[in-house]
Amino acid sequence: MKKGQICQGIVERVAFPNKGIVRLEEGKTAVVKNVIPGQKISFSINKVRKGKGEGRLLEVLEKSPLEMEQAPCEHFGICGGCTFLSLDYENQLKLKEKQVKELLEPVCAPYYDISEGIFEGIKESPRQLAYRNKMEFSFGDMVKDGPLSLGMHKRGSFHDIVTVTGCKIVDEDYSKILSAVLQYFQNQPSLMVGNSEEIGRGIPYYHKMRHTGYLRHLLVRKAVKTGEILVDLVTTTQIAGEEEQELLRGFVEVLNALELEGSIVGILNTHNDSLADAVINEGTSVLYGQDYFYEELLGLRFRISPFSFFQTNSLGAEVLYETAREYVADAGKGKTVYDLYSGTGTIAQILAPVAKKVIGVEIVEEAVEAAKENAELNGLHNCEFLAGDVLKVLDEIEEKPDFIVLDPPRDGIHPKALEKIIAYGVDRLVYISCKPTSLARDLEVLQARGYRAERICCVDMFPATANVETCVLLSRKNGGNKSTRIEIEIDLDEADKRECIGTATYQEIKDYIMEKYGVKVHTSYIAQVKKKCGLDMRDNYNKSKKDDYVAKQCTKEKEEMIKEALKYFGMMREDSN
């Protein structure tokens, strides 16, 4: 097996999230993403390390016996949005349940067998299709210099955009809005953008390599319970003045003329001149209505702004939070509860009616402000929300917790923050995880310090995709020593070769940015951004020993590119700033 070799094989299994394991004739194995167990595939070897290969899927030669005859979406396989849509829902659930159990079993095995009444399987989403309450569509083209597209990135491509008018994980209102907006901008006369006149008709999209163009993203959010819709057009400032105003007036007219099941309560325009391929708010104006909408969960009402974090599956979130509330049970009654990594305070407000006080901590300031507004809206006056990094804010809170709920971002809990959480010595805590590999890592530490899982349950918040939520109830057993420390021996030479941060090396992040933007970034810039985002995992032992040494600071534009890479590799939440 060598780099560039074309191989064939049958996918034996798929490890979380979408890593297919293929065994080759010579007994070696390769990992190929975006496949289904039982498929016969051809793939190209991209990397070989210690006898194991990493491959890129070329073609599915034979479908898996588990797959349906026809996937329910015309865009499946081309669009990069869904991975498991060709499986019926029962098989999707079985696959995800198996993946999580395989990750957690070896972690818990030294202490107990999770098969003995601890692992409770997986709960399904109330809706398997049309379940999302938010979509972030991108403008671009399907082929180089082709007509304007609006939709999702093509699988495996940074640049090509697939127009997804038939997307099945959202309802018809999204498709109607997407089609109307695309047609409107395709049919406009070309305008002067940057320093050159665009040829032909249509408003140009923002070209990531040339840094010219106007259209960037279309953000659509729709509440499942209230039916309220918020639409935000994200553009550059390369069309301005009366030309832009006239263009946006027509955009509003087109949307308001649509016959939709829901109702549009706000139409916005956000300016974003950043080089990063992400929705970054550099100023938002209201073109029609208001800049928020309302959604309801478990009898509570939430005001949601265009960029605030909120679970993307409203009905699935009710299942998840009901599970968490069941796990907390009477343990939080009349007690002080910490809701760490609290987002917009959804969990805190669900627990508030029975708790003495709930203290939420969240690093995204906009989410904290939204949490305060929502608590007031719901008449909950025993909630306190603090903005800042959990690692630092815990030192500032005087009132100690009786119970802790953890709902960290994908990369899990910073090791130093986890030590502080353990040091409180609470009898019980609930850990909600959106990435089971991070959960497995943190569980190792929690169990070594005396905690044991009493109940584990998966919740399928993201049907058709490779993602899953996991909820764990942990209790501290007698004999658990809060002062115990875990000694870990680290080979710094080996660590320096592969400076691993979550699921990507520094070199992989550099390569991603170079391929996507054609820009070089220094390792120290990545380290700066990682630390700024609370992802710093250890001290920099290569730092200059000179007293007067001042590190060169990362520019704002490169910082945004690095954050986009961190989100791509799953080390930052999509809503993080």
Image: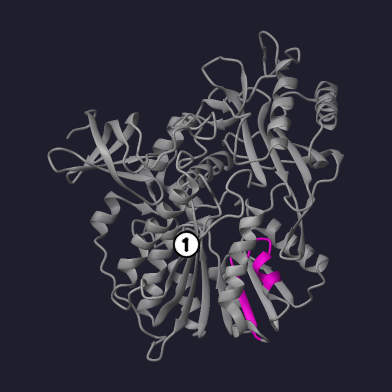
Left or right: residue 62 versus residue 550 is left
According to the image, label 1 marks what residue?
A: 412
Q: Is residue 515 left or right of residue 381?
A: left
- Identify the residue at horizontal 41%, vertical 49% (top origin): 17
Q: Residue 29 in the image: x percent, y percent?
A: 21, 43
Look at the image and tell me in which quarter the N terminus lies.
top left
Residue at figure coordinates x 73%, y 74% from the top left: 383
Q: Residue furthest bottom?
A: 478
- Crowd around label 1: few <14 · some 14–19 · many ≥20 (10 Å): many
* In-image side of 506 versus 571 (left or right): left
Q: Is residue 248 visible?
A: yes
> In x, y percent, where is residue 265?
84, 43
Amino acid beneath label 1: Gly
Q: Is residue 333 magenta?
A: no
User: What is the span of residues highlighted in magenta in the rendered image?
Assistant: 335-350
Q: Position of residue 292 (x, y in %)?
A: 79, 49
SS type, badge 1: loop
In the image, 32 versus 157, the foreground residue is: 32
Residue 546 seen in the current view: no
Above or below: residue 434 compared with residue 386: above
- Vertical comparison of 77 with 424: above or below: above
Display coloring: one colour
Percent of width and height locating residue 251: 80, 27
The image quadrant of residue 5 is top left
- Number of numbered tags placed on the structure image: 1
The front one of 76 and 194 is 76
Q: Residue at x 82, y 42 (%)?
A: 263
